[in-house]
Amino acid sequence: MSSMESLAQLEVLCEKLYNSRDSAERAHAESTLKCFSENSEYISQCQYILDNATTPYALMLASSSLLKQVSDRSLSLQLRLDIRSYVINYLAGRGPKLQNFVIVSLIQLVCRITKFGWFDDDRFRETVKEATDFLGLASQDHYFIGLKILNNLVTEMNQPNAAMPTTLHRKIASSFKDQFLLQIFQISLTSLNQLKSEAPDDFGYIPLDLALKCLSFDFVGSPVDESSEEFGTVQLPASWRPLLQDPSTVQIFFDYYKVNDTRVSKEALECLVRLASVRRSIFVEDPARSQFLSHLMAGTKEILQTGQGLADHDNYHEFCRLLGRFKVNYQLAELLSVEFYGEWIGLVAEFTTRSLLSWQWASNSVYYLLSFWSRLVTSVPYLKGETPSLLDETVPKITEGFITSRINSVQAILADNSLENPLDGVEVLQDQLEFLPYLCRFQYQNSSLYIINIIEPLLQAYTERSRLPAPGDADELSVIEGQIAWMVHIIAAILKIRQTVGVSQESQELIDAELSARVLKLISMTDTGAHAQRYQELSKQRLDRAILIFVQNFRRSYVGDQSMHSSKLYTRLSELLGLNDHLVLLNVIIGKIATNLKCYAECEDVIDHTLSLFLELASGYMTGKLLLKLESVKFIIASHSENFPFLAEYKCSRSRTTFYYILGSLVFMEDSPVKFRTFMEPLQQVAFNLEATPDAAFWNDVAKRAFIGWMRDLRGIAMATNSRKTYGLLFDWLYPSRMPLLLRAITRWTDEPEVTTPLLKFMCEFVLNKAQRLTFDSASPNGILLFREVSKIIVAYGSRILLCPNGTDIYGSKYKGIWISLTVLSRALCGNYVNFGVFELYGDRALADALDISLKMTLSVPLSDILAFRKLSKAYFGYMEVLFNNHIKFVLNLDTNTFVHIVSSLESGLKGLDTGISTQCASAIDSLAAFYFNNITAGDAPPSPAALNLARHIGEFPNLFPQMLRTLFEIILFEDAGNQWSLSRPILSLIMTSEQMFSDLRAHILASQAVDQQQRLSQCFDKLMTDVSRNLEPKNRDRFTQNLTSFRHDFRLK
């Protein structure tokens, strides 16, 4: 960069990099300029650009390049100090004239250097003082640059960095918090007071944002999850107490809320939310806490009275969060002790009622309000004293307001198609209804009467419509169904909460029965008369989904394994509907399940929800046994292939697996081979038809879909086999007669994932030895025969898929089948039901062919793709663990380049973020190093061919083991690995292979540390091998793991 001409050329490139719409032009500029961020020799040129460039984009390049260089943590201490001082002076001299995005980038650079050097030199900590000096300069621009530096510094200190170990980040954040955070918060308050009279609309946002960053700091090493109501309290240190006890601290945020700029007012409310969440114990005396609470309540009372700012949606939402915090952090008795509690609670009740009626606008905000009221009512039984809580008057109005608003919403949504229907979002719906049951059960008698008075006329109208020859006015019927659906959801939510404290269980159960009776009566009505013609209608589907949720909640409370048999509910249900026990009620539920499965051929949501309920019932030991007594269940099992049209719907084909898993579970409960064979007859007929299909017809869609469905059905049944006996029934049914069909299909449809995926997933389940179900008699060859079939299928698939060209969706067309194949093989190899030595002994190629083709499949996938696709990654490294643990000779017999590629991939897996994959890689490396130690380092007998191969591989690549040991030590020392025990195993094995390798690594690590730390760290290394013998016995390994834990702790102490 010797002339202004080359600087001008660089400025043109920077302009293209940041502004060009041509992607090729941008890519060229990026590749040309990346040297500035990758090579430390260009740091001086970045300074030249900052000093001489005239365009903001060139300045941005220099700043962002320096940021990347600093973030790599490879620059010398003096260089980092020089960069920091230069940028601070640069901001002081030229900052006011720079574009804002350049200022932000330079400030980020200063803050990153400050954080990364925090413990390296005290001069890095002067950033806070220097930012404060900016505030004292005459220029307003300098003032705001100083605030922005502090703002960004708090953000940087609070935010983990990928290049920094989490423990080091926490130490730096804690040190920063203890030394400077209170001072910075005081600066933000001072700035707010200064700017209040000057220009709050324009600039108040910056100090407000700084205050919010301070209050949002991670004070205890566990970040606040703002999406959760349960994060508890903001753990401010005791040193902040005087600030909180000063009334002006809270008042300044209420003052800024009144500013017209909504961005400012929202930020002020966010600060108040955090202040309302400050830990109770920060106030030593009750009067101080009461005064703080009173001040918060007074501020919110004024907002409730005037309604100022609440027309803005963001303000409205934050204000609801603020109200919700009152009961999260304060007891009902404390709220009652505030002088104007009665007026305040009345205003909150009115505000809540209005919010409920504005459901289109405030649906997400209502969650916090209902949370507040539910916490209030659950506190009433624990309230002492005579002061009235006024909840008896306010809560019923809120309950009624919620129900009324939801009933009215149905008509509004029908009139306006642009509105989203809350009944369509199950998760959002559950959030809305989470707190309502507590309000309803607060005065359950009154609430239930209100609900019954609403639902009864609706049920009557719905019954009358069912008797008409035709459905009639579709819109009117849709409204009725929508309103009933809401009432069913509300009753379902109430039943989810069995009872509340301080109310008799018997009276609550009787009311539960009254409400449940209405829904149970509805169940029989929804599928009769004209309603039986409306399964395509969305409103009917919503109603049936609501009924399914009701049945699920009712079952958990009153049916099955965990419920009470002597419930008063059944006595009342017997009087109302004749349902006197579990069995009769189960019959009603199963009837509804069967009807849904018969009639909803094309609605996946209802089918999936119905099957989910059916699975719940079949999975319970008691309910499963009860189901087998019902004629309706016997009918479903006997005619499973005839009466359920959804099985023929291609888009519902995934549901087939669940359906047959349920039926298989029920069939296997009876423990009858005869019933199993009868149950399998329809599936056997499908197999016969496919086997008889000539090759020409085997290609068509009819045969293909039949085979896909057959595979999904069999996978469900295989999932249901949980014992040796039940698995044996399926195995005998399938082998050997059905296996040629699988081989034929995978040979014909290799390049069609919609066929190969269900087939391979079935095999994946079929070879899995869960609960030791694959335990054959000692005289049985079934384990070997099964593996031979697995080998045939994997070889047939692998040899053909490798020849297929890569399509646009390479994951769907190739990688998915490859990872499932690897999983099949992994499960078969480690299932412990095959003696693999038999294959080599008798010259059977099944094992060798399967291993060969699997290796070819793995080598066909670039390592970058293996690491990019999570499922592929898990399957690949799981397979490698099995290979290295059980079939290491196969790996060692590979050519050196392939061997090194595989071992290097294990190192990549170690460095990944997935703990499970890291553990698998560590296990594989441990097996390899242990083999080397046992057969080469400590081997007495003549080395085996496999050992000679390993020695040859390591001879050609002597850095292989040292590099892995270095990687493992770096992970242990500088990262927060959750699998330290697993990582310790290969470390010891690698150390045992060569003491010189360990000595070299030790010297390398010590040389990279500060000189004044080297003696202490050398002693840490000495302790690491204390009492560790030169062997890999379990006791020796455990001792080394304990030493490594201590070593890691001592090494990381600063």
Image (cartoon, rainbow, N blue to C red):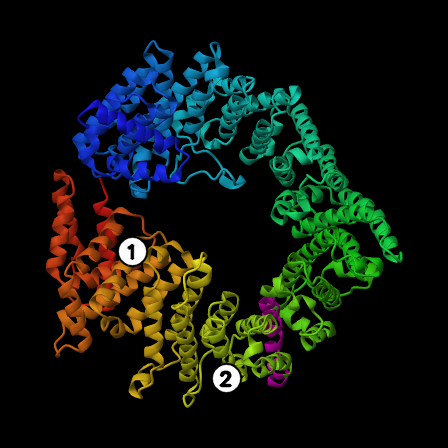
Front residue of 835 and 871: 871
Q: Which residue is mark 1?
A: 908
Residue 187: image location, x then y, percent: 38, 19
Q: Residue at x 71, y 47 (%)?
A: 490
Report the Cα–Cα distance between label 1 and label 2: 41 Å
Mark linked to residue 659: none
Which image quadrant is residue 907 in? bottom left
In the displayed structure, 144 sits above or below 588; it is above
Mark 1, residues whose alpha carbon is within 10 Å: few (<14), some, or many (≥20)? some
Q: Which residues are magenta?
A: 656-677
Q: How many marks?
A: 2
Which image quadrant is residue 789 in? bottom left
Which image quadrant is residue 661 in? bottom right
Q: Can I make out residue 449 in this image? A: yes
Q: What is the three-letter code of the residue carrying label 2?
A: Tyr
Q: Residue furthest bottom?
A: 779
In the displayed structure, 678 sits above or below 348; it is below
In the displayed structure, 758 sits above or below 1053; it is below
Residue 658 is one of the magenta-drawn residues: yes
Q: Residue at x 60, y 65 (%)?
A: 653
Q: Which residue is mark 2?
A: 735
Element type where label 1 sits in the image: helix
Mark 2, residues whose alpha carbon is within 10 Å: few (<14), some, or many (≥20)? some
Q: What is the three-letter code of the residue carrying label 1?
A: Ser
Residue 987 is one of the magenta-drawn residues: no
Q: Earlier in the sequence, mark 1 or mark 2?
A: 2
Main SS type for the magenta part? Answer: helix
